[in-house]
């Protein structure tokens, strides 16, 4: 079991997951979002290769439109 924080909220997972799996499990649309792991932005092309570790801190930022 690993524990990570996503936008300051604790989440537990049975095993290590990558960013792509995290977005799917949290049911977040991947359109218009950026993800940082431990204050380092993860490139979208590397989400499937970026596995989260115990106590990682993930920040998911959603872009907004408006005027």
Image (cartoon, grey):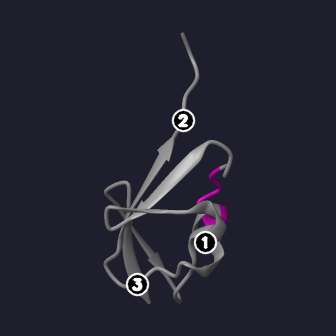
Q: Position of residue 43 (x, y in %)?
A: 55, 63
Q: Is residue 64 magenta?
A: no
| First in sequence: mark 1 vs mark 3 | 1
Q: Quadrant of the C terminus?
A: top right
Q: Nearer the viewer, residue 22 or 33?
A: 33
- In the figure, is residue 60 to the left or right of 57? right
Q: Nearer the viewer, mark 1 or mark 3?
A: 1
Image quadrant where residue 50 sits: bottom right
Image quadrant where residue 55 sits: bottom left
In what element is the residue under mark 2? Answer: loop
Between the C-alphas of marks 2 and 1, the distance is 20 Å
Vertical placement of residue 58 versus 49, above or below: above
Q: Is residue 25 magenta?
A: yes
Q: Position of residue 18 (x, y in %)?
A: 57, 77
Query: Residue at point 67% right, 49% down?
Result: 29
Disc number placed over residue 63 in the picture, else none? 2
Query: Residue at point 44% right, 90% down?
Result: 1
Q: Residues within 10 Å of mark 3 (few under 14, many from 20)?
A: some
Q: Nearer the viewer, mark 2 or mark 3?
A: 2
Q: Which residue is mark 3?
A: 53
Query: Residue at point 60% right, 72% down?
Result: 46
| First in sequence: mark 2 vs mark 3 | 3
Image quadrant where residue 5 sits: bottom left
| First in sequence: mark 2 vs mark 1 | 1
Vertical placement of residue 17 versus 21, above or below: below
Query: Residue at point 65% right, 56% down?
Result: 27
What secondary structure characterizes most of the magenta part?
A: loop
The segment highlighted magenta reads 24-28
Between the C-alphas of marks 2 and 3, the distance is 26 Å
Q: Which residue is mark 1?
A: 46
């Amino acid at each position: 079991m690993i524990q990570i924080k996503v936008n300051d909220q604790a989440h537990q997972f049975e095993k290590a997951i990558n960013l792509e799996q995290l977005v799917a499990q949290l049911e977040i649309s991947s359109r218009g979002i950026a993800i940082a792991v431990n204050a380092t932005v993860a490139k979208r092309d590397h989400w499937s290769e970026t596995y989260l570790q115990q106590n990682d801190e993930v920040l998911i930022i959603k872009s907004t439109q408006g005027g």
